Image (cartoon, helix red, strand yellow):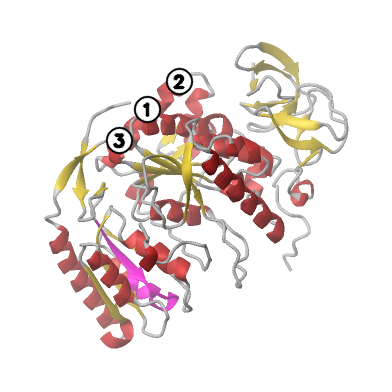
Amino acid sequence: MKECFRIDMADNVATLLQDAGAEAVLLRGLVSVREIRLTQPIKTGHKVALCALESGAAIVKYGVTIGEATQHIAEGEWVHLHNCRSRYDAQSSNLNIETGSREETPYV
Amino acid sequence: MSELAWQGYLRQDGRKGIRNLLLVIYTVQCAEFVAHEVARGESDAHVIGFPGCYDNAYAIRLMLALARHPNVGGVLAIGLGCEYTQPARIAEVVRHAGRPAEAFFIQDKGGTSSSIAHGKSLLASLRKSIAEVPRVPMDWSDLVVGCECGGSDGTSGLAGNPVVGRFYDHLVDRGGTAIFEETVEMIGLREILARRGKTPEVQNRLLETYDKAERYCHSVRQYSISPGNFAGGLTTIEEKSMGALSKSGSRAIEGVIRVAERPSAPGLWLLDSVPDSSFMQYGYTNPNDTEGIMDLISAGAHIVLFVTGRGSVIGSPIAPLIKITGNSGTFRRMQQDIDFNAGCVLDGSKTLDEATKALAEIVRDVADGAHTKPEALGHREYFIMYKHQDTPSLSEGCRA
């Protein structure tokens, strides 16, 4: 079974340790192990929501707030640029979701 | 961690180096070609240089710190002849520190070919004069190590950086010196950083340093995060910052130094490379990984640990770069460039302590003369930019 890792018990997201499809993966942490079902494919190093999160909710990883939800996020959903924004960097929610590059920069 | 000592090179200022290199320095872009041609085929000669023609105290201090780095035996400074930065004055400072140095202007030597020939003959005589540098035993307490991350992904904060952090704890506990930087990658962690200060004074200095970095990123509308970071799973600068800070380990921070300053005592130090306010505006800070690596070397780092989740092929002049990834897939793809796979802690094949021990063995071997992969491949990237920092002038007591 593929795995994801939760760093701090307060975290509401976990990091995928392998690329995974829409499937059940093993949630590992320092003290607990359980399964969580991904609602969509998520790549290595990317985050999965461990519970449902309302728009505006703090996204917590390493036990600290790393951003806030910009829309409702379901348990098992991919948490990234499309549904989470920085509380400092205004550009973070305005990027290509796959490549992370800035869409509005002209190349002409 | 292995307690075995190795043999270093004793400098007249009492510091010990792990390499005995010749450093070719050019003082304007116009002299870059000649400088590289002088060093071509000379495996012990590294090149750095400053592209600007105009005067910049920060860039000069940085070059003077690199010229007197303990891994450098002798220096050849090459200028075109028109620029503000004076190669002869660089050579004079190096000689004053007890090491051989030469300098010339290309315009005085007749042009490209004659300047290259002249430079090569000067390198040969410098090499002779550093051949007899005394060898002395070195151990962890003599070692200064820097760390940097670049091309970070979701594994960097889980594996690559925590292994470096654990190694830093071991190094500090054995009397060594550990330097970390990237204050622009501590965004959102103001109080977490400040709590690490050894004394209330250091805690206040950490708060000031943090506030300056946050203010600077906000003012230039660019935080230290790139498309590769996003593609690798990092969503915000706050998330990247928590991963980046884990490189520093868990020991108390002794103090904050600026670029080209040396720590005044062993232990864990934060290097602040963000510009201070100036009538000039210096644009984006920390514009690439190499810039930060140069800053760490200017603080006296003998070796720099570079954590890259996505994979990077850079190296460094003067101080060897040890490349580490926490991403086993990246390691498989880029093993020709990467020295150590910390991904072993994520697949459970090694504990954090076992991985730290394995990394410490590599550091010791590199200190003892073994080449890192970037070193063996010939990677010597460098980057020196116009900047301003409120550091004391040489006459007021530069420790570099």
Q: Is residue B244 above or below residue B222?
A: above
Q: Are marks 2 and 1 in contact (CB under 8 Å)?
A: yes
Residue designated by label 1: B358
Viewer-nearest residue: B117 or B217: B217
Q: With B302 as the anchor, is B222 left or right in this view?
A: right
Magenta-drawn segment: B21-36
Q: Pointers 2 and 3 in contact (CB under 8 A)?
A: no
Depth check, mark 1 against mark 3: the one in front is 3
Q: In the image, what residue occupies the spot 62% across and 12% down?
A: A31
Q: Amino acid at mark 1?
A: Ala
User: Does residue A95 show up?
Assistant: no
Disc 3, SS? helix
Q: Identify whether A27 is placed above or below B276.
A: above
Instruction: Kindly identify the residue that appears in the image at 46 percent across and 64 percent down.
Output: B384
Residue labelled with disc 2: B350
- Most extreme residue toward the front is B200
The mark found on residue B140 in the picture is: 3
The residue under the point 21% across, 62% down is B99
